[in-house]
Image (cartoon, rainbow, N blue to C red):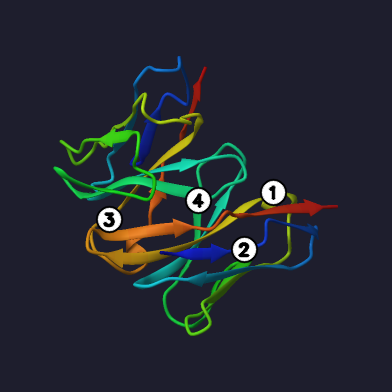
Amino acid sequence: DGGITQSPKYLFRKEGQNVTLSCEQNLNHDAMYWYRQDPGQGLRLIYYSQIVNDFQKGDIAEGYSVSREKKESFPLTVTSAQKNPTAFYLCASSPPGLAGIRHTQYFGPGTRLTVL
Amino acid sequence: GQNIDQPTEMTATEGAIVQINCTYQTSGFNGLFWYQQHAGEAPTFLSYNVLDGLEEKGRFSSFLSRSKGYSYLLLKELQMKDSASYLCAVRVFTGGGNKLTFGTGTQLKVEL
């Protein structure tokens, strides 16, 4: 089945450690996105990538890094510089193009990161 | 920047109709989306509007007025499983491609 996978579902790390969250899709989508969600909040965009080997900062990129070496994969690293990393992290992807309902974003199941 | 407002929470009765409003201020508007999100899960796509008017999809309808920066999601024949957060999101086109900006979500509670 085609879809977006994120692993693990729950992740615990000690303060000061970097951690990488995985996001893989087999939908042949060009664009991929990382969001962060805090309790009672909407989604905030961290980074996004429209094509392989290219990515752009979102609204809250500080303390995060990404890579896009393959179309299927868009890993997110939460670095020790991120002051409040505990949150629910969601990855999404969308088909190529710029407009229209076809270019809806579809979300993976999310990873809940807790930094102790 | 983008600014999206929607009520924080609403309560409605099973079988009733509820309307969730969303107002936005943005540049580069390229569509408005509604997503449903159950607690601890990923958002799922409900509806999309880019032109003014009403889009109907079963028990769910969504309306857009671009001149007023206003949208609503209408849920009919409410069921208990409709208890969830409903996220309004505006897509804007930037030099780097499309971006979605989300409102904080409206927590809907459906009661018997």
Element under label 3?
A: loop
The answer for how far apart the CA atoms under marks 4 and 2 are is 18 Å
Residue depicted at 33% across the width and 69% down the height = A100
Disc 1 and disc 4: Cα gap in Å?
Answer: 14 Å
As shown in the figure, which amino acid type bears the numbered disc 4? Answer: Thr
Using the image, tell me which numbered label, if any, was put on residue A95: 3
Residue at x 42% of width, y 75% of height: B50
- Which SS class for mark 4? strand
Label 3 crowd (10 A; few <14 / some 14-19 / many >=20) = some
Badge 1 marks a residue whose secondary structure is: helix
Residue A29 is situated, as x and y percent measured from the top left of the image, at 25, 49
Viewer-side label of 4, 2: 2
Can residue B63 be seen from the camera position used here? no
- Residue at numbered disc 1: B81
Taking the image as shown, residue A74 lies to the left or right of residue A1, namely: left
- Please identify the residue farthest to the right as the structure is shown: B112
Where residue A99 sits, quadrant-wise, is bottom left
| Circle 4 residues within 10 Å: few <14, some 14–19, many ≥20 | some
Q: What is the number of the mark on residue B6? A: 2
Task: Report whether residue B45 is seen.
Answer: yes
Q: Please name the residue shown 54% across and 58% down the image.
A: B103
Report the residue marked by disc 4.
Answer: B44
Q: Residues within 10 Å of mark 1 (few under 14, many from 20)?
A: few
Given residues B81 and A42, the one toward you in this image is A42
Labels 2 and 3 share a subunit? no
Identity of the amino acid at label 2?
Gln
**What's the chain of the residue with tag 1?**
B
In the shown orientation, is residue B60 left or right of residue A9?
right
What element does badge 2 sit on? loop
